[in-house]
Amino acid sequence: MENMPTKNDKPVLIYDDDCGFCRLWISRWSPFTQDAVIYHPSHDVAENYPQISPEQFESSVYFVTSDGSFCSGAQAVFKTLAFAPNGKWFLRAYEKVPGFAPVSEWGYRQVAENRKIFSAVTRWVWGGSTQIPTWFLTRRVFLFLLGFVYLLAFGSLWNQIEGLVGQAGILPAELYLNNAETQWGSERFWQVPTLFWFNAGDGFLQAICLLGAGASLMVIANFFAGWALLLTWVCYLSIFHVAQPFLGFQWDTLLLETGFLSLFLVSWRRRMHERPPSWFVLFLFRFLLFRVVFSSGLVKLLSHDPTWRDLTALYYHYETQPLPTWLGWYAHQLPHGFHEFSVASVFIIQLGAVFLIFGPRRIRYMGCAALVFLDVLISITGNYGFFNLLTIALCLLLLDDSVFSRWLPTKGDKNKTSVFVLKKRFFIKAGVLGFCSMLYAVPLLTTNYPSIYVSIAKTISPFRIFNSYGLFAVMTTSRPEIIILGSDDRANWLPYEFKWKPGDVTKKLKYVAPYQPRLDWQMWFAALSNYERNPWLIQFMTRLLQGSPKVIALLEKNPFSNSPPKYLQAVVYDYKFTDSEIRNRDNSWWTRKLLRPYTPIMQLPE
């Protein structure tokens, strides 16, 4: 540090205005340091500092303190950044960590001597501006989509919940809660956190769905968004715990985890643009997206499934997925070479491109584009409820306001940035989010979980605030399909037709997503094992024998509309897609072959 006579009221950073690289990074740093540091181009103030030659100004930045002392190079950069919130770490390392100072100065010299190259790299990575991005519009778009996903989820459940877990449904919620009370006693409210402890009747089931849908509309409209998000999360968690196997999908837990994190994204006042989103919350959302995508790629490798290993998984996927689509039928007809290329692309995106979401602006945008591209392809070739829309919503959090401002008006203060401002509630939020981070990080660091981690994870697991993900670890290579048959004489059997799952081989494959028919999905899972492992299926068939209107409403065709059949049986067929020749000749989407009975012949006791 040298001394010079010129003094200033505040520290000054002097830079070469002819250097595009310098201008880019000065625009990045100035919002952090705000008015604590004054930035001047050397052309304007060089005459005030005769001790520094023009050549020196051209080769380095200079930091001048208020008492007139100055320094240059990496030290000048670190002294400048020390005036930013939480920005003293580099300066401390420079001053106290052995070897850090010479390495930093060497790196600075390399950049200074190759400014054009590093300027081009910076512009390619960050774009034309390195200014700190804002996330007001991004938050608004994300919450709009999250509210829409919640609305879809509650709306589809409202249409099905009485048939699934109503009093005359397949697995009555009231009976489930009675068993939970017997099992857990006084701990039941923690182990099964649900509003249905107050009332598990059909009316209350419907009311919670409508309440959640109403709160979803509040989120969409940005009306008391914080309280609305809390209400949607509580309502969905309540339904999650009483819906039993019908809400056991990964996108249900993803919605709960996303909804929980969203409580920390919003302002709990009416207008959200008053405060910028927390950088740490945005990071946790990125990490959640990373876990969902990367885990889905990793489980495919760890499962040692041969179809993933030899890139043949898509030979079977479109045909064997739970609810195929007509476009999936056409995709199935594509050449095997294209399918193998597609599987390789899936691995590249899920195990490689996903890391781009942690990069600077343009790198992050590329990661977003790759993940959205994959989700769009999945959504147009399969029916996966609201999963793809929710994942795309998480991807859009990778884009800052500079993207959305092209189409949406900016209501927030553009001068506000996501710098770190300590407030009274900061430590509470930081504690909760830090706790969540610990839960996420431990499984990535070790497989020998500490006992305290296991205890904490087990304790809070009923609230589904962190979950495991990983889709299609093992690819099914055949399609067993359960067909429910009814009869009055055990000689003539008539099939029940479901609304969406395959049955009649000439029935056109349809799109149903983002609506999710819960019963149709469960029938796919049941076909992969036996009825002993799916006791709900026996309850379902019992309701058909009883003629339960709420359960029958979940089906498309009831061949016994006048009175229930006396006998019922489930059989398993092997379904395969037709090829183009058979499709054109017979108008059939499937061929099928009877495999075996799935259940014994059932009848109600006399």
Image (cartoon, grey):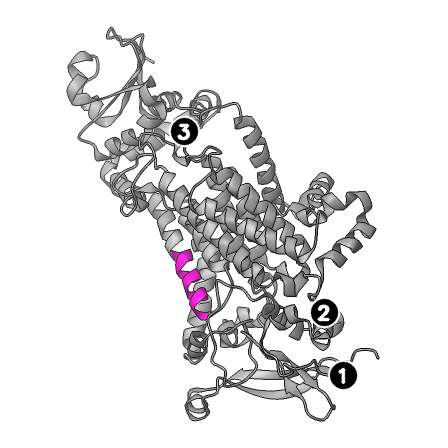
- The amino acid type, in three-letter code, at marker 1 is Ile
Name the residue beneath numbered marker 1. Answer: 601
Name the residue beneath numbered marker 3. Answer: 419
Image location of residue 171, percent across then percent down: 71, 63
**Magenta-span inclusion, residue 374:** yes
**Magenta-span inclusion, residue 495:** no
- The amino acid type, in three-letter code, at marker 3 is Val
Image location of residue 1, percent across then percent down: 34, 14
Residue contact between numbered discs 2 and 1, judged by CB atoms under 8 Å:
no
In this view, 586 is above or below 274? below
Mark found first going from the N terminus, 3 or 2: 3
At a point 53% along the width and 54% down the height, the residue shown is 292
Name the residue beneath numbered marker 2. Answer: 534
Mark found first going from the N terminus, 3 or 1: 3
Q: Which residues are magenta?
A: 370-381
At a point 59% along the width and 65% down the height, the residue shown is 518
User: How many numbered marks are there?
Assistant: 3
In this view, 324 is above or below 194? below
Mark found first going from the N terminus, 2 or 1: 2
